[in-house]
Image: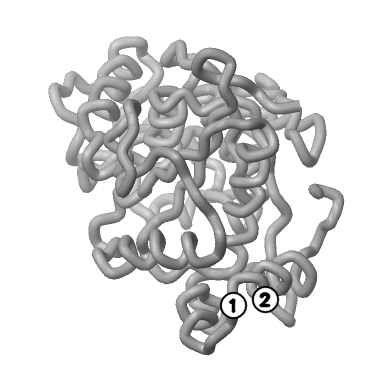
Amino acid sequence: MCAMGVAGTYRGRIAPSPTGYLHLGHARTFWRAAERARESGGVLIFRNEDLDLQRCRPEFVSAMFEDLRWFGIDWQEGPDVGGEFGPYAQSTRREFYLDAWQKLLSGGWIYPCSCSRKDLAESASAPHDDNDEPIYPGACREKRMAAAVPGGVNWRFRVPDGERIEFVDGRMGPQSFEAGRDFGDFVVWRRDDVPAYQLAVAVDDAAMQVSEVVRGADLLRSTARQILLQRALALSTPLYFHCGLMTDESGLRLAKRHDALSLRTLRLRGMVPEEARTMADAEFAPNRSEK
């Protein structure tokens, strides 16, 4: 079942980050997102998640458009085609994030955190997934700070300890995460004055009226965090569909360091899109139940 957005229209999205060349794993997930939008007669949005200014590069931005078009994915809204819910690059959407940060601050949902990475590494005691952040020990939880702008410290969202965040995933079924045990207080704004992933995604999905989020299974736990943000900000919650992750021959999840499997490398080797789609679907698919 697919959720409907504007005037009953399905609205999906693909949201790559231009921090390297996209690989087959990205393309496989984005292809699934495009399929679900197409099957529903809906709209696919391209959002450029370029907040990491130190790692994002212009050549990777242009490569995202070129390589995904080559793979066979089309979108109806995005930085290169426009649309009524733009801008579609996160680096140009700061006012949206600032407004959300102010609402969270006014509502008492967030607090300033001065803990360093070393502090967190030394105090982390709760087990956590290798793909997820450690549980925050709460050293700064009672801090208060009157601030007109968010920069200079990390700002964390205070999760409701013991509350279970539940949702039904379109591929993986019922999901349940306990706040304070499965994940802790998480960063919504970084000390370098950049909105964090969780906040930016929750704000943008609502502002762009996304009805279903299709993404990799490594972000399953992030859904619980984003649902808490949606509640705090009185935003709508879309449906979610988390795809299985592609791995290499040794069983490691594909990353942008796997240059041999980047779309750009496959193109330069003369591979045609049909071959790349077959390779993504058959050779590395760890779970075929999502079809």
Q: Residues within 10 Å of mark 2 (few under 14, many from 20)?
A: few
| Distance between mark 1 and mark 2 Cα atoms | 5 Å
Which colour scheme appears in the figure? Answer: one colour
Check disc 1 and report the residue beneath it: 272
Per the image, the residue denoted by label 2 is 275
Specify the amino acid type for callout 1: Val
Label 1 secondary element:
loop
Q: Residues within 10 Å of mark 1 (few under 14, many from 20)?
A: few
Residue 5 placement (x, y as % from top left): 54, 20
Note whether 225 is above or below 74 in the view shown: above
Q: Residue at x 52, y 16 (%)?
A: 236
Depth check, front residue: 218 or 45: 45
In the rendering, at what x and y percent does residue 289 appear?
Answer: 86, 50
Helix or strand or loop: what does disc 2 sit on? helix
Q: Position of residue 41 (x, y in %)?
A: 62, 31
**Residue kind at label 2, given as amino acid type:** Glu
Please name whichever residue, 80 or 138, is drawn nearer the observer in this view of the structure.
Answer: 80
**Relative to 54, residue 93 above or below:** above
Q: Marks 2 and 1: in contact by CB < 8 Å?
A: yes
